[in-house]
Image (cartoon, rainbow, N blue to C red):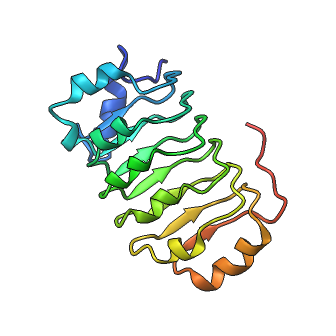
Amino acid sequence: MNRCCMGRRRRPRERDCAAQGARRHCRHLAECKLVSFPIGIYKVLRNVTDQIHLITLANNELKSLTSKFMTTFCQLRELRLEGNFLHRLPNEVNTLQHLKAIDLSRNQFHDFPEQLTTLPALETINLEENEIVDVPVEKLAAMPALRSVNLRFNPLNAEVRVIAPPLIKFDMLMSPEGARAPPR
């Protein structure tokens, strides 16, 4: 079954969304082989962007997101971008002041996206299976709502592993040093 919900087989995904209590406040574009966010979607959704609280662009072929994406969907509460080819976020991610969860797992980040540390409502950051070595522990520790940062299967440096635990008040998930992710 085609899981790209903007195509003909959209209804089951919308029901999933409604079952989660989100109703029409989400858009799923997962597993559509997208290399960029479709420009036509901006036009279709222009009158309801402030009502969209969840966007799923998981398991596509995205290499980047534009500043227009971030500023258009500034009311997002959750953004699911796992399984793409992203290596950075636009600076305009700081417009997502209501964002509570972001999933960037299985992408190509080499640097921790520090713009996320400016988001006051952010509770969950998932960066599992990237190539991140260093983490801004002090900035993360200062985030008021942060509950969990998943950094499993990243080649974190020893300093992060030693410094982080006494400074943080949230869950930081890390793999044992040298651990590799299982093959996909």
Asked if 81 appears above or below 3 in the picture, the reply is below
Relative to the observer, which residue lies in front, 29 or 93?
93
Q: Residue at x 47, y 70 (%)?
A: 147
Q: Quadrant of residue 159?
A: bottom right
Residue situated furthest top in the rendering:
8
Where is residue 167? Give x, y as percent: 59, 83
Q: Quadrant of residue 107?
A: top right
Q: Residue at x 35, y 36 (%)?
A: 69
Relative to the observer, which residue lies in front, 36 or 3?
36
107 with respect to 4 (left or right): right
Residue situated furthest bottom in the rendering:
166
Q: Please state, as top left, top right, bottom left or bottom right, where the C terminus lies in the image.
A: top right
Where is residue 18? Give x, y as percent: 27, 40
Residue situated furthest front in the rendering:
91
Asked if 40 appears above or below 72 in the picture, the reply is above
26 with respect to 172 (left or right): left
Relative to the observer, which residue lies in front, 77 or 89?
89
Residue situated furthest left in the rendering:
47
Q: Residue at x 42, y 55 (%)?
A: 101
Q: Residue at x 65, y 80 (%)?
A: 165
Where is residue 24? Give x, y as percent: 23, 37
109 with respect to 60 (left or right): right
Where is residue 169? Give x, y as percent: 52, 81
